[in-house]
Amino acid sequence: MPCLDIKDGKVVKGVNFENIKEMGEPIDLARKYEAAGADELAFLDITKTNDGHGFYLDLISEITNAIQIPLNVGGGIASLEDIAAILNAGASKVSIASAALSKPDFIKQAVDQFGQEKIIIAFDVARDLVSNQYFIYTNGGKKKSEFEVFDTMKKFDQIGVSAYLITGIASDGAKLGFDIPFFQLAGKQTKTPLIASGGAGKIQDFIELFQKTSVEYGLAASIFHQNLVDIRSLKENLADNGIAVNL
């Protein structure tokens, strides 16, 4: 699942959520990744929560009209009206982060109105070096919350959501591999599908992720934007290693 991190209408990428650089045009990259065999795309407005600007509804609509694969949209979604607007623009699912924590009843209302298959919970996480626990960060990964990730997952498991999209802040953009120990722990805590994000640098990182954890999707940005890994070659290598993929 390639990720289009969006700032000012352009695709951007940083390292550990810092040093953001422009990577290209969203529609061009969306078409490129669909042609290369991506199963789904993620679209993340990385400044919406902090800046409060409007959603890029026209851009979402343009992308979904240009491709056939699902587009999952996140960033600053905080109301049922927000969800409706984004789904009406053509998105297949929405991913909700900060508002899932600040509004206790919001996710249940969203699931009741739109169905659990439309709702992804997105967590940016980092390990606390003192307690050795993983905590959720909000506001684009800038603000540590009081929420320990596994306790919070249990709460949303009771509601029922389609997936957890979890980004390891310490790994993000570093190209040193996914946080395998974390995703091994996460897979033991929930039966809800996991989308792993943060750290992919080479094909072997994905092979290790799927062989050693129960994660269903590997999400990446830098390695695809920078043409370091070709999606079709990645999927062929996964298949060669006994990992079930759509070829």
Image (tube, helix red, strand yellow):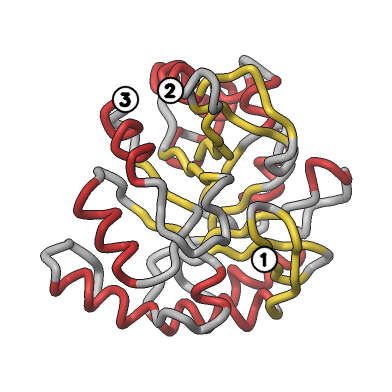
Q: Is residue 188 above or below residue 131?
A: below
Does the CB distance between marks 2 and 3 fall below 8 Å? yes
Label 2 CA crowd tier, 10 Å (few <14, some 14–19, many 20+): some
Q: Nearer the viewer, residue 212 or 160?
A: 212
Residue beneath the point at 47% across and 24% down: 132
**Marking on residue 189:** 3
Q: Give the amino acid at mark 2.
A: Phe
Q: Give the amino acid at mark 3.
A: Gln
Q: Which residue is mark 2?
A: 150
Query: Does residue 220 appear left or right of residue 236 in this picture?
Result: right
Query: Does residue 138 appear left or right of residue 221 in this picture?
Result: right
Q: Earlier in the sequence, mark 2 or mark 3?
A: 2
Local secondary structure at mark 3: helix
Q: Quadrant of the N terminus?
A: bottom left
Q: Is residue 157 above or below residue 243?
A: above
Q: Is residue 225 above or below residue 49?
A: below
